[in-house]
Image: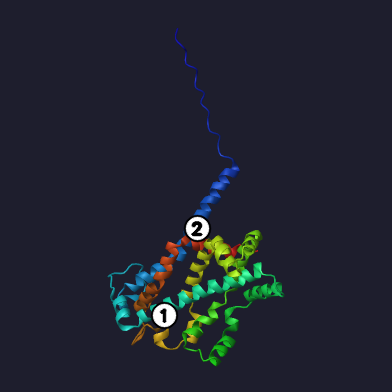
Amino acid sequence: MTATPSPVLRTTKPPPTLSVRLSRMWGGVVTALTLLLAVVWFFPLYWAVITSVKPEADTITAPPTLWPKTFDASSYTYIFQNSPIVRWYVNSVLTTAIITVLVLLLSMLCAYALSQIDFRGRRWLFWLILAGFMIPFQASLIPLFIFINKLGLVNNFLGLILPQLAAPIAVVIYKQFFDQIPPELGDAARIDGASEWRVLFGIFLPLNWSITGALAIVTFIGAWNNFLWPFIVMNDTARLTIPVGITQVQSAYGVAYAKSMATAVTAAVPTILAYLLFQRRVTEGVMATAGLK
């Protein structure tokens, strides 16, 4: 006997519903808008790099060209030989490193006290810190400069660093994370004789390394790119930071666009590397900032 094969039933795939088609269309629109925004955000960096490798005469031609006719790296050679850009880099590295470390340390200590230590006026102090969000830095710029001037810290690195140590956003973020840690962990450590310093650095900090790393990267990028306050408080060319130093790159006939762009590209390298290497940390920091309640 031979077995007769059973017929194979062929089913036709039903056409997509209206909601599925609309969802696909919306996904395509979102993708197109995302690509458009990526181009818009990337174009200034592209333009800076392209301009920096053009001959100086080609930077003022009309209409502007999106690709250099000839590549010329003399602008980079010029800024390293005829401007104190290395000194500006050293100034930026030192001040940014100090600001980043101190902002994290001071914000952590303040947040721990507000979260774990019961003292009179704690709630009012926290609301006062929150009120700092409503005061833009530009509004306090003149009184702050007068205060720093009376202290004799104008054109001084200490006067450059101190005003940037106030970071209420970092305090609030740390406090939000410290509030989520079970208090039993700290109480058990205190019963065993641990001090508040040991509780903070031995228990609370290791549990929040991820947010500390995110805040460190965001603080570093912000301090490195800060222009307004260093521009106001520093007037010695040898003590400028790299963002302010860009404005000093000129020729005998006015602004040298290729050289200015070469300086800007050189100044942007650390922040670009920091973002590429620690992109996840930067995203965590931005999401933590945006997710505050």
Give the residue number, with chain letter if any, for mark 1: 91
Amino acid carrying label 1: it is Asn
Sequence-wise, the earlier of marks 2 and 1 is 2
Q: Residue furthest right?
A: 120
The residue that label 2 is drawn on is 34
Identified at 60% across, 70% down, the residue is 171
Give the structural element (helix, strand or loop) at label 1: helix
Left or right: 44 in relation to 26: left
Number of other residues with Cα within 10 Å of mark 1, as a class: few under 14, some 14 to 19, many 20 or more? some
Q: Is residue 60 visible?
A: no
Name the quadrant of the C terminus: bottom right
Q: Is residue 202 left or right of residue 116?
A: left
* Residue at 62 percent of width and 74 percent of height: 133
Percent across and percent down for residue 287 are: 56, 62
Q: Residue 193 at what x, y percent from top left?
A: 61, 65
* 173 shown above or below 17: below
Q: Is residue 202 visible?
A: yes
Q: Is residue 89 above or below residue 274?
A: below
Kindly report the distance in space between the C-alpha atoms of the residues bearing marks 2 and 1: 37 Å
- Report the residue that reaches farthest toward the top: 1
- The residue type indicated by label 2 comes to Thr
Q: Nearer the viewer, mark 2 or mark 1?
A: 1
